[in-house]
Amino acid sequence: RSEIRRKNQCPQISVLNACPYTCGLCCKDDVNFTFEHIYGTKNCDWLSKKEKRIEKNCSKTSKSSDGRLIKDGCSQTCSNCNELHLPSMPPTTVLSTRPSDLPSTVPSFTPSEAPSVLPSAIPTPSSSNVPTIDPTFLRSIPPTTIASTR
């Protein structure tokens, strides 16, 4: 039941921020966690030193003085980290009402299928090296008003 609750609650940002351990954002041994062992009070650092200790103690169901299982207090050593696979946000279905404030920093990967209807507000800094297939019949610049000296 608690696993279902965790999966339902942790996708909420407020819960995720308030409960990072429970929601699987961090996986560390609790440095203050201790448990009773036949050789006295032990901690996660002691447990992590030998693989045999990990195998024998991480699966124990006895609880520590604070009520947690060894695998919960020493979650990293016992490989008992909560993993939460949050679904990605679905794409929006509503188009933006206005363009973004800043231009793209890189060109788009896919060129437009059709030419623009309106001319660009700012002319390109350099002319094209390739002539157009369909030249226009309009002059591109107005004629000069100063007579030629040649």
Image: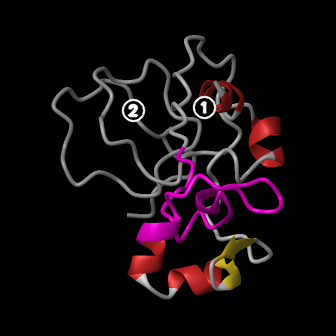
Q: How dense is the environment of label 2, judged by Cα within 10 Å: few (below 14), some, or many (20 and up)?
A: few
Which residue appears at 82% of the width and 62% of the height? 65
Q: Is residue 41 left or right of residue 8?
A: right
Q: Which residue is mark 2?
A: 139
Mark 1 lies on a secondary structure that is: helix
Instruction: Give the number of marks.
Output: 2
| Magenta range | 55-83
89 over 64 or under it: above or below? above
1 vs 143, nearest the viewer: 1
In the rendered image, the quadrant that contains the C terminus is bottom left
Mark 1 to mark 2 CA distance (whole Å): 72 Å
87 vs 70, nearest the viewer: 70
**At which x and y percent is residue 51?**
40, 79
Most extreme residue toward the left is 133
Q: Which residue is mark 1?
A: 3
| Residue type, label 2 | Arg
In the rendered image, the quadrant that contains the N terminus is top right
